[in-house]
């Protein structure tokens, strides 16, 4: 159904959809693909097709069964705005998020153009749904502009895996920035100056900044200390910091 998550900025994952296709350099060493391949070898039924796109309607109502409020990462094993998914089905997922409104949901995509198209079709997103885009270097900053066109209470950026300088960003209407290096057997190293550039912009603009990891062979290999401290800030809502709860 769903799973507790080791991802530092969420509580659990909810995968109504699994499988995806690569769209940019950040996808090259996709952790979700590695997990899916391993689970396929373990003969886990849900991943019998490996990382091919697959819908799992049996878990559609999972959030309604969780009575305690959670931070839920939606489709950690896919992309909610994949081109093969019809808008009507995506609406079904948003309907569940709206009904189970005691949770907060984090939706992250690299398909920002399709996000824009869906937003025109759907309208304003529920206040308990945070919408974000993933950006790995300056070549993909257009995703940030696309994100800011959608009506969402929380817009956030995941600059991970960070593969190069993102450069100066227009952070107007951005409520949260996550950054981190790549992990896994073929990880690409993250430069400290790229991270400082992001952190310093967030400090100037007073945007909550979350540094997830340096990366390495495993997510924990390099730790998460940047210039002598941890940076684990969350979006501010009604002048309060919304923290991850266990």
Image (spheres, grey):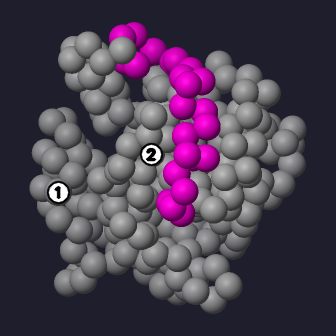
Q: Position of residue 29 (x, y in %)?
A: 30, 33
Q: In what quadrant of the picture does the N terminus appear?
A: top left
Determine the residue positioned at 65% across, 19% down. 84
Q: Is residue 159 visible?
A: no
State which region is magenta. 46-71
Q: Is residue 2 visible?
A: yes
Using the image as rendered, state which of residue 5 and residue 137 is in the foreground. 5
Marks 2 and 1: which is nearer the front?
Answer: 2
38 versus 173 height, above or below: above
Using the image as rendered, state which of residue 122 and residue 225 is in the foreground. 122
Tell how many labels: 2
Determine the residue positioned at 21% across, 52% down. 219
Q: Quadrant of residue 185?
A: top left
Describe residue 34's horizontal placement relative to residue 175 as left or right. left
**Crowding near the residue tagged with mark 1, few <14, some 14–19, many ≥20 C-alpha atoms within 10 Å:** few
Using the image as rendered, state which of residue 62 and residue 137 is in the foreground. 62
Determine the residue positioned at 48% across, 56% down. 158
Residue ID for mark 1: 220
Q: Position of residue 132 (x, y in %)?
A: 59, 54
As helix, strand or loop, the secondary structure at mark 2 comes to strand
30 versus 46 height, above or below: below
Q: Disc 2 or 1, which lies upstream in sequence?
A: 2
Describe residue 60's horizontal placement relative to residue 28 as left or right. right
Please identify the residue farthest to the top as the structure is shown. 49
The answer to the question of whether label 2 and label 1 lie on touching residues, with beta carbons closer than 8 A, is no
Describe residue 246's horizontal placement relative to residue 42 as left or right. right
Q: Position of residue 114 (x, y in %)?
A: 71, 35
Residue ID for mark 2: 13
**Crowding near the residue tagged with mark 2, few <14, some 14–19, many ≥20 C-alpha atoms within 10 Å:** many
């Amino acid at each position: 159904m769903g799973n507790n998550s080791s991802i530092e900025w969420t509580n659990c994952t909810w995968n109504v959809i699994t499988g995806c296709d690569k769209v940019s350099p950040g996808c090259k060493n996709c952790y979700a693909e590695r997990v899916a391949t391993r689970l396929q070898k373990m003969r886990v039924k849900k991943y019998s097709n490996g990382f091919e796109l697959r819908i799992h309607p049996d878990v559609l109502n999972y959030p309604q069964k969780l009575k305690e409020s959670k931070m839920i990462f939606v489709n950690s094993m896919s992309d909610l705005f994949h081109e093969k998914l019809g808008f009507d089905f995506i609406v079904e997922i948003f309907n569940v998020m709206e009904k189970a409104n005691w949770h907060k949901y984090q939706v992250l995509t690299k398909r920002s153009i399709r996000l824009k198209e869906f937003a025109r079709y759907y309208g304003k997103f529920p206040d308990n749904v945070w919408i974000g885009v993933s950006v790995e270097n300056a070549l993909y900053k257009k995703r940030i502009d696309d994100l800011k066109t959608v009506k969402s209470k929380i817009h956030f950026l995941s600059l991970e895996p960070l593969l190069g300088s993102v450069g100066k960003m227009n952070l107007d209407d951005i409520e949260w920035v996550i950054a981190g290096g790549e992990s896994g057997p073929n990880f690409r190293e993250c430069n400290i100056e790229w991270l400082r550039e992001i952190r310093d912009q967030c400090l100037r603009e007073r945007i909550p900044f979350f540094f997830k990891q340096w990366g390495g062979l495993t997510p924990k290999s390099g730790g998460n200390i940047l210039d002598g401290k941890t940076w684990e800030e969350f979006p501010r809502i009604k002048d309060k910091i919304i923290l991850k709860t266990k």
